[in-house]
Image (tube, rainbow, N blue to C red):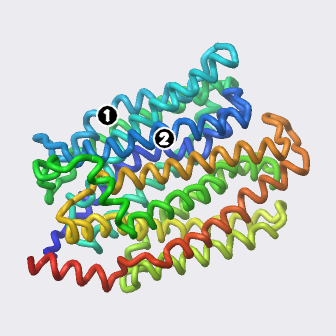
């Protein structure tokens, strides 16, 4: 296929779009469970149920958004305009989701459901087209790995900003009132997200747009049937669900682990910072490390190593701060170095399906897998809530029973280790390795 070089400036601009998303998404991953149980005032079980319930709606809206994006034609392009149209609503809703109203418990529960649902809907309206846009920016598989590397480096940078500034901002802006602190902090994050979306919109270019009129000839149901018959898509969908449960277990229990296992709440921001800074490094070296390695083999090897390290961390005493920090850093370097490979595989599925059926389904391929990610996060969030409840975790308590401490330790180490190892099993029949992709490229060029 004909490769179109992409400038570093454009790669950075594309990545900044995910920085904007991750300023809020990483806050959800790292703090939302803790916010809802210890600040907002929900029970762990109600919080977990809400995470699952919102995903039921996503099952419909994510797929619809992908189908709508595939059929969009505007003077701004096919996928880019959604960054412009939904930037401000996204910024506003991220603030409202972290606002604690003065209502009864039932009123607060309803408010949490409504605000979190609306945030999820607007996130879908921005993130689905944003992810699909990469296939319109470049048609080269390795160039897309580079784009994804920049994207995840800058995405993780957004998370790093959150880990460095969120808790200090909560304390500073709240002036002792944590509920106000979270709300004011998200006003800052939301405003910054809006600016970054506008930069991404203005400095990227869609070079390989889809024949929208041809896509409109097919129904959404036809597109879904095509995907369901695609073995490689089914594999990656399953992979994303399982992977994000593992990610949520690790990320969503970090504060619990620091507070109850390490007994060092003062290290919360430092551990979060180390986690995300190492992720930035991992994403940046991804394209170089895996340059001459088959993507599928590289991904499997990375997951096996990550699983082994997570398993080993279970046996490290909470008082061994140096060992815990070292393991967390190495684990996150491995995870984020492998992530661009995983996402570039989605682009490969789009190319392979176009070669097979003549359909270019960028929007719906990415949207269904974004739903898989949200589903994994919802399942993970629900399981965290239910398992903490089973362990008799007491929100806001200075000390926790041993049953709660053991659940927290398992959620941070053993449980994600098992799930990460399972990813290798899930990928065993994935067919789009580098050799197969090279054959597809040659056929496409010949055509």
Residue 280 versus residue 446 in the image, above or below: above
Q: Is residue 303 left or right of residue 41?
A: left
Give the residue at x 31% y 52%. 364
Q: Quadrant of the N terminus?
A: bottom left
- The residue indicated by pointer 1 is 86
Q: Splitting the image into 4 quarters, where does residue 137 fall?
A: bottom left
Q: Is residue 125 left or right of residue 253?
A: left
Give the residue at x 59% y 30%. 182
Residue 393 versus residue 307 in the image, above or below: above
Closer to the chain start, of discs 2 and 1, is 2
Query: In x, y percent, where is residue 101?
Result: 60, 17
Asked if one can make out residue 47 in the rendered structure from this viewpoint, the answer is: yes
Asked if one can make out residue 13 in the rendered structure from this viewpoint, the answer is: no
The local secondary structure at tag 2 comes to helix
- The residue indicated by pointer 2 is 24
Give the residue at x 48% y 41%. 24
Query: Badge 1 local density, few (<14 within 10 Å), some, or many (20+)?
Result: some
* Count of labels in the image: 2
């Amino acid at each position: 296929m004909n490769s179109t070089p992409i400038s570093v400036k454009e790669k950075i601009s594309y990545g900044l779009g995910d920085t904007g998303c991750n300023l809020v998404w990483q806050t959800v991953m790292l703090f939302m469970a803790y916010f809802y149980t210890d600040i907002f005032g929900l029970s762990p079980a109600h919080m977990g149920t809400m995470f699952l319930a919102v995903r039921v709606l996503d099952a419909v809206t994510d797929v619809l958004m992908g189908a709508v994006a595939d059929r969009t034609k505007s003077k701004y392009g096919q996928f880019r305009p959604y960054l412009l149209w939904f930037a401000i609503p996204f910024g506003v809703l991220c603030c409202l989701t972290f606002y604690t109203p003065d209502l009864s418990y039932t009123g607060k529960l309803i408010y949490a459901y409504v605000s979190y649902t609306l945030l999820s809907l607007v996130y879908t309206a921005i993130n689905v087209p944003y992810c699909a846009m990469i296939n319109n920016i470049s048609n080269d598989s390795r160039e897309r790995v580079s784009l994804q590397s920049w994207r995840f480096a800058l995405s993780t940078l957004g998370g790093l900003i959150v880990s460095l500034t969120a808790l200090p901002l909560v304390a500073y802006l709240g002036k002792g009132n944590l509920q106000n602190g979270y709300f004011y902090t998200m006003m800052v994050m939301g405003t910054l997200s809006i600016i970054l979306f506008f930069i991404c919109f203005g400095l990227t270019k869609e070079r390989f747009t889809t024949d929208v009129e041809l896509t409109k000839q097919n129904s959404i149901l036809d597109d879904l049937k095509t995907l369901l018959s695609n073995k490689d898509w089914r594999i990656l969908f399953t992979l994303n669900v399982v992977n994000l449960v593992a990610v949520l277990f690790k990320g969503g229990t970090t504060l619990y682990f620091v507070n109850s296992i390490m007994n060092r709440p003062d290290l919360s921001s430092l551990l979060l910072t180390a986690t995300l800074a190492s992720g930035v490094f991992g994403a940046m070296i991804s394209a170089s490390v895996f340059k001459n390695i088959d993507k599928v083999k590289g991904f499997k090897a990375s997951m096996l190593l990550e699983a082994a390290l997570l398993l080993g961390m279970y046996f490290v005493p909470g008082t061994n701060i140096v060992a815990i920090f070292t393991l967390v850093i190495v684990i996150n370097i491995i995870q984020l170095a492998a992530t661009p490979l995983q996402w570039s595989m989605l682009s490969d599925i789009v190319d392979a399906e176009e070669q097979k059926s003549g359909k270019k389904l960028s929007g719906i391929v990415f949207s269904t897998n974004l739903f898989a990610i949200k589903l994994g996060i919802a399942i993970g969030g629900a399981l965290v809530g239910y398992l903490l409840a089973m362990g008799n975790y007491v929100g806001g308590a200075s000390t926790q029973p041993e049953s709660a401490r053991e659940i927290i330790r398992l959620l941070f180490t053993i449980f994600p280790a098992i799930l990460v190892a399972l990813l290798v099993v899930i990928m065993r029949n994935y067919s789009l390795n580098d050799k197969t992709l090279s054959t597809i490229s040659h056929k496409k060029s010949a055509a």
